[in-house]
Each structure stands twice: as C-alpha cells, then as structure tokens.
C-alpha cells in the first residue's frame, strides 16, 4: 500500500482491484470462473464429438475413453452437450445478473435522488413490472427466443429480476442524500448525475454485489425452469436447464447424465459467490484487510 | 471521615483489550470528584463498572466498596438494592435515559416506590416535590407530560430528580451536560449543586470539559489511555499540574476570557488505541518532555504533593506552560482597514421559513417555523466572521441558505459580488469554485467508499482540472499530512486528521471564501487546538475569508475577527470580537458569555453567573416584539413597565453602539462579564 505514490493515482478502482486480488477468496473464485469459461469455449475442441452428433453404437453408456462423460439415451456425448449448455448458461446467467443489478441501481438511485416527476414515473414503472406475472410473459414471448435470439432472452430475464432491489436502492438513496458527504459534493459543484454514479451507487455496493451474486443463480435457475417447460433455450441448442431436466429422469440408473451438469452448476454458483464476497470486502473500506 | 465510595485497582477488559487499568479513587460525603479525560480514555467504562452496568462480556477485577461493602462479584440482587438507592446515576443523553411511553411523574414515582414502602399516591406527591426541587415550573402539571414533551434541559432535570429520589449517598454523573447548550448547561449545573446540598451526596462527575470541573469539583482525576495519570485537589491540578498530559490539556483549551490572539498549544498525535498501547508511558509518543527512560516502564503514580499524585517520572520538572512552543505567524496590520477591503459575502435581511404541515393525505398548513427571520451581515476579504448561537437559533440554516446559491425567500445574498437571485448556471459554478465548505463531522462529510486521493481529486475533476496527482500531494502537505496517505480510506485516520482532509478538499480549488460549519466541535480538545491553529495559519497564508459557524464561543474568540450572536433567527449582537467579548451589550450575549465555564477554579468560583430562565421558545411561535424578552434578565428585573411595553411591541433591530459593535436591544448597555 505504501508503495503507491500519489503520482500513480491511487484511485478507487486501483485500490479495489488490489484488495480484491489480495484475498484468497477472490483469487480462487476468479480462477475457477476463468477455468469454467475456458472449459466452455475451448473444451469442446478436445473432444471428437460435437453436441449435435449422435453415437448410434452407444446409447446411455457410462463414461469411457470414447465418451468421457458417457452418453445420453439419444446417443449424444454428455461431455459435448454439457459444455455447450454451460456456454449458454454462463453467458445468460452472468449477463442477466449484471444487467438486472445495474438496472436496479440506476433506476432506484435516480428515483431516490430526484423527487418529483422522475421519482413518480420510475416508481410507477417499477410497480407495473412488479405486478406483471413474469413467468407468463416469458412463456408467451418464448417463441421469439429462437436461434441467435439469446440476447433478447437475457434482457427479458433481467427485466423481471430487478424491481425489488430497485425499491430498496431508492429508499437507501433517499437517506444517503441527506448525508453530509453528498451535500459536500453538491456544494462543490459536482453534477447530480456524477454524484449518483460516484457517491451513491458505490455506497450501496455491498447491497448491489450481494444482489448480483444472488441474481446469477436466480437467472440460471429461472432459465432452467423455463427450459424445463420447453420455453427458453430451444432444441437443438441446449442449456443447463434442458440438460438437468432430461438428466433428472435417468439420474437413478445412469447418474452420469445428471451429476456432471449438476456439479458444474454448483461450481459456477460457488465461484460467483466467492467473487461476490471478495468484491464486497474489497469495496468496503471498513472490512478487515486480508493479510 | 471514611469514604462513601472507594475504588481500588479497578481493571476492565473486553476480550484481550484492557479498557481500564488500575483505576483507584475514593469520595467522601459531600465531596465532588471530577473525572476528566478525552474520548476513549476509559472514564465512562469506569463508572459503568462501578455501577455494575457493564455487558456480560466485560471482565472486571479489583475492588469497589460502597460503605465498606464490596460490589465486585456481589450478587445481582444485592446490586439492585444498592442501585438507585445508595448510588444513582445521571446519564449523558436524557432522552434515552427516560422511557418514552411513560409519563415523567410516573417514572420518578416508580424510582421512589422501588426502594421505599409508600403508596402510589405518596410516591406521586413525592415525584411532584422532586420536580419542583429541580426547578421545573408547574411541577404538578408537568409530571403528567411525556418525555418527548420536555426540552433537553428539562429532561436532564427530570433525570436528576430521579437520581436524587431516594436520597442517595453517591451520584455518578456521566457527562451530564455535554448534550446541552451552554445556557442550559449552567442551569443544570446549578440544579446539580442544589441537589447535592439537599442530599449531602458525594458526586462523581465524569466529563471531558475542564471548565465544568473547575467550578464544580473539589478533587480531579485525569485519565489517559484507561489509567489515572494525575489526581489531586482542583487548584493543584489547574495551577500546578505535574503530568505533561494535564499541562497539554490545559493549554490546548480555547478560553473565552483571554483576549489577544495567543496561539493554542495542541498535543501532537492522537491518543493510543487500547488494543495497541505503546511500551512504557502511554503518553510518551505525544509528550514534549519525553526521554528514553519513559519507554522503559509505565510510571506509577508518584506522590508529588499533599494528596496530589502524578504518573510521570519527570514530574519535578513539569511546569504549567507559559508561552507557546509553536508560534503561529500573525500578520495583523498588513491588512488594509476594513472599509477599504472588498466585501466577499453580504447577507441582507435573509428570511427562511418552513411550513408546518399536518395531515397525511390532505396536507394543510398549520403554522410556520421562522428559522431565520431577517439576518444581515457582511464578510470582507481576509476576515473571519464567527456566527454563534445555541442550537435552534438558525445559524446552520443561514449557512445552508448561503451555500445553496439560490434566491432566498426574502432578502438578498451577495456572494463575491454576485447576487444569488440572478445567477446563471455558469456563474453559479464559478462561485462554487470560489466558495467552499468544511462540515462539522469529518467522518460524515467524507465519502467512506472513496480513497483520500479520490476525495481530494473530486473538486478538481468537477471543475475540469486535469491530472490532479500533483495538486493532491500539495494539498496533503499543506494541511500537514503525508502524501503517502492518499491511498487510504477516511476510516483509517483519527478525527483530527480526517478534519484536515476535509479542509484540504475545501482548499483544492483555491477558494476565496470558506464556510466552516462547526469544524472543530466533534474533536477532542487536544486535537481541536491543532485544527484551529491550522485554520488560522491557512487564512493568513492563502488570504482566505471565513464564515465560521459554531456554538462554542471560546473557539470563535480564537479564530474570528468579528462575531455575530444569533438568537431565535435574529442577530442579537454583532461586532468586533474583542469589543463584543470584552463588553457585551445585549443581555443575551452577556448571559451566554457568563454561562461558559472557565478552566480556572478560582475565577470560576468567584464569578457572577447571569442565569437565563426557561428554554428557547419555539421558532414556530416566537414572542412578540423582542424575541428574547421571555428569558431576558433585564426585562424581568431592571426595566419599568413603561420600558417593557417597548420590548413587547417593537422588535429591535441592530443598532450601532460603538465603532464596530451593534446590538439588537432597546436598552443595550455594555457590561463586562468574564
């Protein structure tokens, strides 16, 4: 810490990054997540089978040298489909969580900071989305999520995850606005939008990070349950959701069809939680500095 | 005479941290012992340990004897029998010491009925008597009120009434007046003295204010880092201290009775954390008289005189400080005469009112709070105007109105030659650059999530100065901090250092006018002196003008050139500091100045106090005519009925009495009070 001189601009970003990588939690979580991404994107290259291939000589066979994770009832290679599913789920989960938390923070903070019509409009919009049955809307819109439309799917998922957090953020912003350091910034001539992004949102970072980590699992699971009912990711494409849905039927007598997917899902969620915890500590100056 | 309460070798630890180490004292009947120390010195923990009120996690060893009965390790039932009967306590915060859902009279009656076999009716009568004794007007009626209907001073009186309800032998007062304004503090101290006369109890008075102790205590115990470092008769401690810490404390207090600009002498550094005490004498790292032997072992209490003990190995050489060690450069006389200098801030007839609304769905206006009712003053280049007054007088509202830079409800604010009513966006931005603010609580005014670098760079970035790196290092240097501190968060600094960061931020854009909102009132005295000196030095060095808002008149005397005393939204008296403090003309200023306790036992005992009656009237319903007349000693005693009629009907405006001293009183007369 003392090595940083004033000229090297010890700004918040630098300090937070430094503190994040100082903690074992943060390093492990980050490393695991990077490995998972590597596996999802580079992993399929090591196998002879792609996720669309079917091996008609081996239905529901256990793991072997030929099929590392075994095969499904259709003869599809479990290793190939799992990695393909992971690629989708990782992106959908992480992106949906980030988008929903960012939306919650921005909408909540603006609603709380600007009383009057911006607050009324934003609160009204939040309430509207809150009363719409999200699952039904997603189900109705699912035909749109065909091939290549996963971005739309992410946005829709995120749109139904942010409202409650946004309400909390709004309430906390109203109380934060009274604090002296916000007043000090105002009297210094800092613009309201800058105050929101530089003071209010960072001071809610503990809440937002916890919310984002929870949203990752929530997004993956929502996608899973949607896919389970046949909406969401459509065949021939696969996701964790579709794989777990299929695998759970054969899990008793062919455990490899289920446990590899489930295990990877658990590891993903765990890694995200580790990163979240470490980030929260890194942002929070009051927390014990890792030694 | 045997002591009523005797504490010997008391130790309190929370886990591994020793909060109190070897405290011992004794008080006899009718004696007042003052325990003095800065925050974190363990003085409140000591009293809680004596009362047996510490949480279960605390480990207490040593001995506390009340009338010879050991209290440490006594059963809870025995302690309960003592508490409130033989030994009672007055807490700092009177609001939290009273249960909000019970009537005040019932709470006092409850205290009586716990320890005395009396009927409900008898207890209620006793409660009214007690309220009368502590000087609450219409006690029978007020006994039926709830705590929130009482003002702060009245609540503290009620708590004192409760404490003396069972005629205790020992009353422990833990900062009983810290939360109160000076005029109310003077009232409450009077009540405490009366209560002591009535009950003959011994009082243990815990406070950080050396002035309060000077006039009240017979003996003083000074605590530092959980340990008594000096104990003795009050005169010995104040006039012949033998411990460098006591000397430092005494010379760092700003005094309202000293004119001329003598720089204060701060104690360098900050008090050690109880978890990481330095080896040897805990005060050694801050001590100006430190020698190598100080680090060898913690010094015991040496007998340095009759009933006077001090924990310093060099006590024989310790002398009360006469002259300052760090002379602050004072460039008086270099400034041009006041009328030739530019006006940097002009406030003329400023009015700020808040509507009082009732109802949740259909809000209707049921009244108006007149927070500021026509205030006028000006600040010229290079001078400091102190805006003083008790809480609720409108001084902070005035400051906020100026800082908002918008058109006031009534009146005019001119900042650096620009009328705020006619400001465009770019002009406002330019003024924001030239006028900066320092807040009261440095921890609250610095964003806890930002590093010091970001905090200091923020004003630079907001006004489009690129590459703040160099300037940040310069600023840290200017306020006496190290450039390597830039990567830390505000939490990692002590109170005084944080306030220095707040000052550095305010100076980042090289402003011309600095608005200071109680910048030192959250700091301990030894730290406060350093910040006052820094502000004073910066003013001359950078040619700044200050608008200094404070409730502490002594601090204002040190820093300000001119002072404006506010009462209930109006200026009562304004003028040059030495003129106003030397011979105040407004009865309120006189009462205010005479209420401030001086850290000088002999003068304090011989002083004539002008006690104000009652509390501040509500700003929603100010008295007609002169706002001060309901509490004015002159109105009450000195004026004839004809003269009073003028006070009731006509609101006085500030009238010039002297070259630079004006008072808003029809019958203003100069009077020397301190």
Image (cartoon, coloured by chain):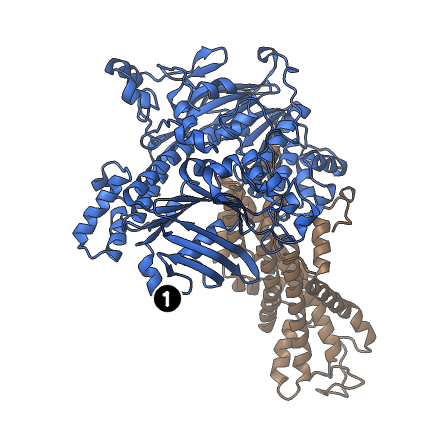
Foreground: A229 or B166? B166
Give residue B670's quadrant in the image.
top left
Give residue B53's quadrant in the image.
bottom left
For chain A, the rendered hue is: brown
Q: Mark 1 Cα within 10 Å, few/some/many (few <14, many 20+)?
A: few
Q: Is residue B130 above or below residue A275?
A: above
Horizontal relation, residue B123 to residue B603: left or right: left
Question: Which residue corresponds to mark 1?
Answer: B75
Give residue B499's quadrant in the image.
top right
Horizontal relation, residue B585 to residue B634: left or right: right
Q: Which chain is blue?
A: B
Horizontal relation, residue B169 to residue B273: left or right: left
Horizontal relation, residue A151 to residue B58: left or right: right
Residue shown at 56% from the left, 36% from the top: B439
- Residue B128 image offset from top left, x and y in percent: 22, 44
Q: Is residue B256 above or below residue A47?
A: above
- Residue B569 image offset from top left, x and y in percent: 41, 26
Element marked by disc 1: loop
Chain under label 1?
B
- Residue A271 image offset from top left, x and y in percent: 67, 67
Residue shown at 20% from the left, 57% from the top: B117
Q: Is residue B215 above or below residue B82?
A: above
Foreground: B431 or B446? B446
Foreground: B432 or A133? B432
Residue A137 in sight in this render: yes
């Amino acid at each position: 810490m003392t090595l940083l001189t004033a000229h090297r601009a010890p700004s918040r970003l630098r300090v937070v990054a430094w503190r994040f990588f100082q903690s074992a939690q943060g390093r492990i979580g980050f490393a695991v997540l990077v490995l998972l991404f590597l596996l999802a994107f580079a992993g399929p290259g090591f196998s002879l089978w792609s996720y669309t291939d079917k091996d008609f000589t081996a239905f529901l066979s256990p793991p072997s040298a030929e099929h590392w994770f075994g095969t499904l009832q259709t003869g599809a290679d479990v290793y190939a489909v799992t990695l393909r599913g992971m690629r989708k789920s990782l992106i959908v989960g992480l992106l949906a969580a980030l988008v929903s938390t960012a939306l919650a923070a921005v909408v909540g903070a603006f609603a709380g900071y600007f009383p009057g019509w911006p607050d009324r409009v934003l609160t009204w919009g939040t309430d509207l989305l809150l009363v719409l049955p999200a699952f039904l809307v997603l189900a109705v819109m699912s035909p749109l999520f065909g091939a290549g439309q996963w971005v739309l799917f992410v946005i829709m998922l995120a749109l139904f995850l942010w409202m409650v957090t946004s309400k909390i953020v709004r309430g906390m912003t109203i109380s934060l606005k009274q604090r002296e350091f916000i007043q000090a910034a105002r009297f210094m001539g800092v613009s309201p939008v800058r105050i929101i992004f530089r003071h209010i949102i960072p001071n809610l970072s503990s809440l937002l990070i916890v919310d984002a980590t929870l949203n990752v699992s929530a997004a993956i699971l929502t996608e899973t349950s949607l896919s389970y009912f046949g909406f969401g990711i459509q065949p021939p494409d696969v996701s964790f959701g579709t794989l777990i849905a299929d695998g759970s039927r054969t899990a008793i007598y062919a455990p490899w069809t289920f446990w590899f997917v489930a295990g990877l899902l658990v590891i993903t969620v765990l890694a995200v939680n580790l990163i979240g915890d470490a980030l929260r500590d890194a942002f929070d100056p009051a927390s014990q500095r890792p030694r | 005479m045997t002591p009523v309460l005797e504490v010997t070798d008391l130790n309190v630890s929370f886990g591994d941290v020793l909060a109190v180490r070897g405290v011992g004292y004794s008080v006899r009947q009718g004696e007042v012992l003052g325990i003095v120390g800065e925050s974190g010195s363990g003085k409140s923990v000591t009293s809680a340990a004596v009362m047996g009120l510490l949480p279960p996690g605390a480990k207490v060893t040593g001995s506390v004897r009340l009338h010879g009965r050991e209290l440490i390790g006594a059963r809870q039932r025995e302690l309960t029998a003592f508490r409130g009967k033989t030994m009672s306590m007055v807490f700092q915060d009177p609001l939290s010491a009273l249960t909000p859902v019970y009537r005040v009279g019932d709470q006092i009656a409850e205290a009586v009925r716990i320890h005395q076999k009396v009927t409900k009716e008898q207890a209620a009568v006793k409660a009214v008597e007690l309220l009368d004794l502590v000087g609450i007007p219409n006690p029978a009626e007020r006994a039926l009120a709830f705590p929130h209907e009482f003002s702060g001073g009245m609540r503290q009186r009620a708590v004192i009434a409760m404490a003396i309800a069972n005629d205790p032998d020992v009353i422990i007062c833990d900062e009983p007046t810290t939360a109160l304004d000076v005029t109310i503090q003077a009232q409450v101290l009077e009540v405490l003295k009366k209560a002591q006369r009535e009950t003959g109890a011994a009082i243990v008075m815990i406070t950080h204010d050396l002035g309060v102790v000077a006039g009240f205590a017979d003996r003083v115990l000074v605590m530092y880092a959980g340990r008594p470092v000096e104990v003795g008769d009050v005169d010995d401690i104040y006039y012949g201290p033998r411990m460098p810490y006591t000397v430092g404390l005494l010379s760092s207090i700003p005094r309202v009775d000293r004119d001329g600009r003598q720089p204060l002498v701060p104690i360098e550094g900050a008090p050690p954390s109880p978890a990481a005490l330095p080896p040897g004498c805990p005060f050694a790292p801050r001590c100006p008289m430190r020698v190598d032997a100080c680090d060898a072992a913690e010094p015991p209490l040496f007998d340095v005189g009759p009933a006077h003990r001090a924990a310093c190995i060099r006590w024989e050489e310790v002398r009360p400080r006469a002259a300052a060690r760090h002379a602050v450069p004072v460039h008086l006389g270099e400034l041009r005469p006041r009328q030739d200098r530019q006006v940097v801030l002009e406030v003329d007839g400023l009015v700020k009112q808040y509507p009082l609304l009732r109802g949740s769905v259909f809000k209707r206006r049921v009244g108006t709070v007149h927070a500021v009712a026509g205030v006028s003053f000006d600040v010229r280049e290079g001078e400091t105007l102190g805006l003083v007054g008790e809480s609720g007088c409108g001084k902070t509202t005035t400051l906020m109105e100026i800082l908002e830079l918008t058109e006031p409800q009534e009146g005019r604010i001119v900042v650096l030659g620009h009328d705020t009513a006619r400001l465009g966006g770019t002009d406002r931005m330019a003024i924001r650059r030239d006028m900066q603010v320092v807040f009261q609580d440095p921890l609250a005014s610095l964003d806890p999530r930002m590093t010091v670098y970001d905090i200091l760079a923020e004003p630079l970035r907001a006004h489009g100065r690129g590459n703040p790196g160099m300037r940040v290092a310069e600023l840290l240097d200017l306020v006496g901090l190290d450039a390597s501190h830039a990567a830390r968060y505000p939490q990692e600094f002590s109170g005084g250092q944080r306030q220095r960061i707040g000052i550095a931020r305010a100076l980042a854009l090289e402003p011309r006018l600095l608005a200071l909102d109680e910048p030192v009132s959250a700091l301990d005295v030894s730290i406060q002196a350093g910040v006052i000196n820094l502000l004073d030095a910066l003013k001359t060095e950078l040619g700044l003008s200050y608008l200094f808002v404070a409730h502490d008149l002594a601090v204002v005397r040190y820093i300000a050139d001119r002072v404006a005393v506010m009462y209930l939204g109006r200026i009562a008296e304004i003028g040059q500091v030495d003129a106003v403090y030397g011979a105040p003309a407004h009865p309120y200023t006189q009462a205010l100045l005479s209420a401030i306790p001086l850290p000088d036992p002999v003068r304090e005992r011989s002083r004539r106090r002008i006690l104000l009656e009652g509390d501040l009237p509500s700003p929603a319903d100010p008295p007609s005519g002169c706002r001060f007349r309901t509490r004015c000693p002159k109105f009450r005693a000195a004026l004839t009925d004809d003269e009073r009629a003028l006070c009731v009907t006509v609101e006085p405006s500030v009238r010039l009495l002297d070259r630079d001293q004006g008072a808003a009183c029809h019958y203003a007369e100069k009077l020397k009070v301190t």
